[in-house]
Image (cartoon, rainbow, N blue to C red):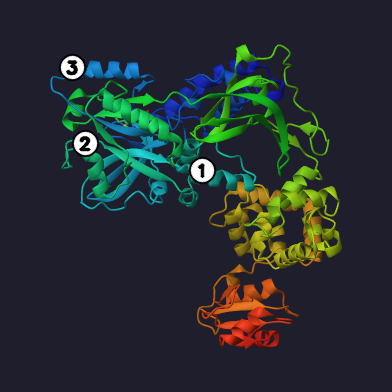
Amino acid sequence: MTDKSMASLTQEQAAAEAAELRPQLIAWGKQYYDADTPKVEDDVYDRAYARLVALETAFPAIVTPDSPTQRVGGSTKSDLPKVVHDIPMLSLGDVFSIEELQEFDERLRGNVADDFDYNCELKIDGLAISLRYENGEFVQGSTRGNGQIGEDITANLKTITSIPQTLSRPLTIDVRGECYMPKAAFLALNERREAAGQAPFANPRNAAAGSLRQQNTQVTADRKLATFMYNIADYEPLNTRTQSGLLDELAELGFTTNPTYQVAHNMTDVGDYIEQYQGQRSELPYGIDGIVIKVNTLPLQRSLGATVKDPRWAIAYKFPPEEVEAKVLDIEWTVGRTGIVTPTAVMTPVALAGSTVARASLHNPDYLTAKDIRLGDTVLLHKAGDIIPEISQYVVAKRPADAEPYVIPTHCPSCGAELVHLDEEVALRCINPRCPAQLAEGMNHFASRNAMNIAGLGPQIVAQLFDRKLVDDVASLYRLTNDQLLTLDKFGEKSAQNLLTAIDNSRNNSLERLLFGLGIRHVGAKAARSIAAEFGDIGSLMTADSESISAIDTVGGIIADSVVTYFASDQVRELIDELRAVGVNLTYTSGAETAIDTEGQFAGQRIVLTGKLQELSRPEATAWLEQHGATVTGSVSKKTDLLIAGEAAGSKLTKAESLNVPVWNEAQLQAAMAETK
Ligand code: IVH
């Protein structure tokens, strides 16, 4: 295998290399499923596969339909144990027009003497799974694999709440269906991945497949996967003898089934069903890519049987891709927190599959070049996995005569440093550690809710702080003064004070918030928490080696290596010293903090704070009271249990007195705080 970087390859060279890799990978993949033949070393396969993915990502035009990369959940190699499907898991024949669907119907009716109905179902865009129950207990779950042999993913499937562990009857059955990731869970997952500096998933199906085929059950559990079951290998143990009845019976047994199915007597009914769900597609909380019609009588299904690949009793009607034209007005390059510079096509806003779309990611320069998209082009837009706007191609006939090939920038749009490709990466990067765009993105992340949670420090203020050179790293935030903040747009005494207080309070955060906020590659909020809890303070973590970090239950080698690399940097060590110097807490304090007192004198009390406190800050007092079980509210009523009044208390004090609500001053609160310690 040649190992040239993408930038130096032509499309022809990439195509030639990919054409060599594909049959090799397919052969290795087959050997993997055949226990008798020796198999190639895992990493040889993995490296070759990764190279093919890189080639095809850089030059999408060279992808062939039979490429091993195009077989979702197919017979690709993995370390998961194999499962033989006693009754094969079939796939479905596809049709793309109503006419072809009519032909399917006519063919079938020509071969079947009796009249029959169809059951119409949505074609869920996920991956097929098979669940085995013995005497009503879930014993094994697998992927479809190549239809004959799948992969054992029992442990991961056990984390999915819609899969029952025990059925309502003690049946021994293999139930088949679809595992998918709901659109909302997919968007949230990608947001989290981007916050942790990881590549987002391209669509919900890839996200679901990736979640099921990786080996950490905790990861699967966090991914919010769902299932719809719709088939059974052998219907004999069931009471019903129809497909629609089967869905009802599966639901009674404890499975989640899709409620949208409809029995159709003829093709007019089928057409109505298609029309209805094609229209509602964008409103569904999960992706669908068509509908499936199935002969509704189970014994008739059985007697019709299957070809090598597909059942004769069912067919999938694929929705025509929902595509619209839009004009490319600009290609915007943005610098992310990790320095990756990403192109986005900015287009005339168009309505597409339920939303208005004006932007689509072009991922990286190679992708943009391979698609040959130019300013002023009219492009075809669709939604990948029913959700992510994607440009499929430009419209040749509509290209303006003077459109020039797009020239990829060579310098960072933010700091002007020269852009580079690291190793084999297709991504273009700015590697200037002081690039303002990266620093600003990093500070936004630092201030975000799951990180240091600095309320009021949003992207617009961060941008101004950098523009006015009031900050240059996250430590310098803690040196900001009231006067400096007053120079910001629309900032008055009150907003300046609030922001300073929020920044000040964040000094006391427990270590996991800082660890996540630093934006260490691959370190999400959860990993940050486990690491902080294990090491207790940043000093111990900074001297830890990769083995001791990856020894933590939910932390893998990639995260551990990333942490070690991060703290090996002199610049990072300087930053940590700075943070220490400005009084940011570098220890883990959550263990003690999180348990809210439910028994002390403040537990369950409704408390109002008013007036100016001298010694304590308002957020500090509120946090302490809440920690001790109180609810701190804004206005006094009959339900208020206590008013704490500082200097110059006004109407709230008067109201409390008139309602006979007990009133304390600041000193009384401090005394209670001291006692409770
Ligand atoms: S029936 C023999 N019903 O589509 C039964 N499949 O393209 C074959 N799919 O592998 C499957 N929703 O992963 C069936 N309501 C549905 C489906 C469905 C999604 C998937 C399934 C199958 C693929 C075939």
- Circle 1 packing at 10 Å, graded few (<14), some (14-19), many (20+), is many
Q: Quadrant of ligand 1?
A: top left
Q: Is mark 3 within 8 Å of ligand 1?
A: no
Q: Which residue is mark 2?
A: 234
Q: Residues within 10 Å of mark 2 (few under 14, many from 20)?
A: few
Dot in front, 2 or 1: 1
Left or right of 241, for residue 32: right
Name the amino acid type tagged 3.
Answer: Asn
The Cα–Cα distance between marks 2 and 3, rounded to whole angstroms, is: 23 Å
Residues 328 and 451: in front is: 328
Q: Amino acid at mark 2?
A: Asp
Callout 2–callout 3 Cβ contact below 8 Å: no
Tell me residue 479's x, y (percent).
Answer: 83, 62
User: Which circle, 2 or 3, is nearer the viewer?
Assistant: 3
Does dot 2 land on a helix, a strand or a loop? Answer: loop
Element class at badge 3: helix
Q: Residue at x 58, y 73 (%)?
A: 633
Whether label 1 touches label 3, CB < 8 Å: no
Quadrant including the C terminus: bottom right
Residue occupying image coordinates x 53% and y 36%: 355
Look at the numbered discs 2 and 1 and tell me whether their residues touch, using CB distance below 8 Å: no
Q: Quadrant of the N terminus?
A: top right
Where is residue 417 drawn, in percent x and y?
A: 83, 36
Give the labeled residue for mark 1.
Answer: 186
Give x and y (percent) for residue 160.
Answer: 40, 49
Query: Which numbered disc flags the more N-terminal residue, 2 or 3?
Result: 3
Please tell me the numbered disc located at residue 130. Answer: none
**Residue 111: numbered disc:** 3
Residue shown at 78% from the left, 39% from the top: 431
Asked whether the viewer can see residue 106, the reply is yes
